[in-house]
DNA sequence: GTGTCGCAAGATAGCGCTAACATTGTTTGA
DNA sequence: TCAAACAATGTTAGCGCTATCTTGCGACAC
């Protein structure tokens, strides 16, 4: 009378809730409660379970969790060539949160968006529940509208213009640009060139506004010739810096709307035989990898990209799970703190500018 | 006599295999077989099922799949500050494969590794099944040994020295450097400066070897003063380029072991009033984002980082699933093709070198 | 004393999929 | 000719966890 126990399915790896429960002398359910830190567990019980978890080296199985909890969640990260550095930092933040919340990240590159409608269809095909929108896509009105129509929760990252149907994670671009400009003014600069960012990104206008306000408050004239239009690329930065430095009364400082363009300004300065920061101060924006790669390191504004990505992912995951309130969506608009990083590329105004071609080189160990 | 159907659990999203099966008039198992493209399904049946899948817009649930299949797999990506651009590209490749294979990526930064043993303990705590090692960690002997001792499958990416207990994805660094050097020679250059990479990365020596071989085969002398030691950073590139350009008989071309250092060489050349490529050709290695950011764009070697990451992830996932052969591990050493990208920074040797400070600027649309 | 509320913990039944086995129908081989 | 081998599908029973319901038990008022 042998009862055939039909299947001890093969590849079992590591202890399960059942093992922990046995070891702690409680039911699996209680272990589950402890894992999810539910309030209705007595401290004593909780301790027993925790000890058992520790002893067995138990780690919950995320697949089982999301299956049983019915809480699966797929978030798409749509990106249209932001710089690699930006994307990488963004991913780090997003991934960290994603693995913690058991959400699956779908990274989708949409360079030349086929058409918002088509894109939305594709996302639906992937069963995407929510969408992360880093710049420049966060400002794509057509895309935003299409996503809204599809009823997908979304988060705009670092946009200058948060819409009322999307979550948004931003810094105060205006205030940041204001702070940087003020910093340059404090250093004694009066003619400060400004390289604007791309027109199609709403943050660009805010950064410019901060620059303008700082000048106005300091009683400095806003010279038209000191304001040049870039597009966030290094190449545009080269051209802008060239035109600024070609001015008869050239600026003593250049504030570029991002680090790539600031790096270009440094390169142009060097080509002109100007030392940075002695003959020309340069400031950037973003604190991208570029800012500490080049020499001298850039004074810049730190934008907490990873943190924005992290919080955005968390907010979306939350939104997907509590899909309770679709009509009255209480979207969150979170504003994070920026930071003014004073590094080597900006210094006090020298009494008398002059050319010099031999910069101090950073020590490079043989 | 009401039979209480106790629980139609709440949040059910989208069709399941059962729905597809009903729609196609087959059993769920057959649907599963079609999804996994098993060979033992009649074409006719397969077609019916495919049609049903299409009609219902069915998408398999990865959580359920990996739970039922017992095939869960966690792969850690250990990184110690490779450049952000590198990491970003690496992640793209790795993520693509990970989501396709239902493996969970754990991204772990280990800047100053606490100690290999401790790190391994931490990985074990995360239930990591395998490890991806991009440079420079792929060359950390202590780490490799510790991982081997822990019995973790691993993959070295872009190493110069593949060990016999790890999978490895590489390009032929020696051949690539040879090709680039030969390219410069073909352009007429005879005095070619070489900026070496960091000593602790095994690929550095291979790149140098390729340079040396090309010179030798062309019958050119290997001048000691043309060979300078960098460490893959932009700053080291500045110093190296300075020393090369300070030589009495300066080189007409500089081949740097990576793009960051090549970019630095371009910057130094410009500071010296040299036009690139008219007065000095510059070549890099990696085809990193930097290479097309700066102006002029760098002639460089394309290293298929994303593809390496993709294949490495696939190999590891495979290895984890068929954990059949632990003793006789048939590790795979895959060599991918590189590509010589001829861009603007390297050109034919000018008959008579001379200084010129006004480079053509890339058109920056205002 | 006896009901009933409150609360911690247990029991049960799936989440969506697939491994392992069972069942057909169809072919072979001796 | 009939058993054995195969090939295409169906059936059953979990994978590891948690939502939902149920139970046990002390507290508290009547």
Image: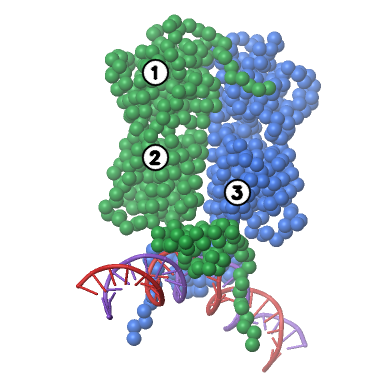
Chain colours: A blue, B green, C red, D purple
Residue at horizontal 63%, vertical 28%?
A232
For the residue carrying disc 2, how many other residues have a C-alpha within 10 Å: few (<14), some (14-19), or many (20+)? many
Q: Given this view, does label 3 or label 2 mark the residue nearer the observer?
A: 3
Please tell me which residue lies in front, C9 or A142: A142
Which chain does the residue under circle 2 lie in? B
Which chain does the residue under circle 3 lie in? A
> Residue A276, image x and y in percent?
58, 18
Q: Is residue B354 above or below residue B182?
A: above
The residue labelled by disc 3 is A122
The residue labelled by disc 1 is B184
Residue at horizontal 50%, vertical 11%?
B274
Q: Secondary structure at mark 3?
A: helix
The image's mark for residue B157 is 2
Residue at horizontal 41%, vertical 21%?
B255
Q: Is residue A124 visible?
A: yes
Q: Given this view, does label 2 or label 1 mark the residue nearer the observer?
A: 1
Image quadrant containing the C terminus of chain A: top left
> Residue A124, image x and y in percent?
62, 52
> In the shown orientation, is residue A237 left or right of residue B136?
right
Mark 2 or 1, nearer chain start: 2
């Amino acid at each position: 009378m042998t009862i055939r126990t039909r299947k001890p399915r093969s590849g079992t790896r590591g202890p399960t809730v059942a093992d922990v429960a046995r070891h702690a002398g409680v039911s699996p359910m209680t272990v589950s409660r402890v894992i999810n830190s539910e309030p209705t567990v007595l401290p004593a019980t909780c301790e027993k379970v925790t000890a058992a978890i520790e002893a067995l080296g138990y780690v919950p199985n995320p697949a089982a969790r999301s299956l049983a909890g019915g809480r699966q969640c797929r978030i798409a990260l749509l990106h249209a060539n932001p710089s690699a550095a930006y994307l990488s930092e963004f991913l780090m933040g997003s991934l960290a949160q994603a693995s913690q919340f058991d959400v699956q990240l779908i990274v989708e590159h949409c360079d030349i968006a086929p058409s918002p409608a088509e894109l939305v269809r594709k996302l639906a095909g992937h069963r995407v529940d929510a969408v992360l929108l880093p710049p420049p896509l966060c400002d794509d009105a057509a895309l935003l509208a299409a996503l809204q129509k599809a009823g997908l929760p979304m988060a705009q990252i670092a946009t200058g213009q948060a819409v009322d149907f999307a979550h948004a994670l931003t810094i105060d671009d205006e205030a940041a640009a204001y702070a940087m400009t003020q910093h340059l003014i404090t250093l004694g600069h009066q003619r400060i060139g400004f390289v604007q960012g791309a027109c199609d990104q709403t943050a660009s206008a805010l950064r410019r506004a901060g620059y303008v306000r700082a000048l106005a408050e300091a009683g400095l004239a806003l010279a038209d010739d000191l304001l040049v239009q870039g597009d966030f690329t290094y190449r545009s930065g080269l051209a802008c810096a060239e035109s600024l430095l070609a001015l008869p009364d050239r600026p003593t400082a250049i504030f570029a709307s991002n680090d790539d363009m600031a790096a270009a300004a440094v390169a142009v300065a060097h080509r002109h035989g100007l030392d940075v920061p002695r003959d020309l101060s340069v400031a950037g924006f973003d604190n991208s990898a570029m800012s500490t790669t080049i020499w001298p390191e850039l004074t810049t504004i730190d934008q907490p990209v990873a943190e924005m990505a992290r919080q955005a992912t968390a907010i979306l995951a939350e939104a997907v799970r509590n899909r309770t309130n679709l009509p009255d969506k209480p979207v969150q608009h979170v504003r994070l703190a920026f930071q003014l990083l004073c590094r080597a590329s900006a210094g006090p105004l020298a009494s008398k500018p002059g050319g010099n071609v031999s910069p101090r080189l950073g020590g490079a160990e043989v």
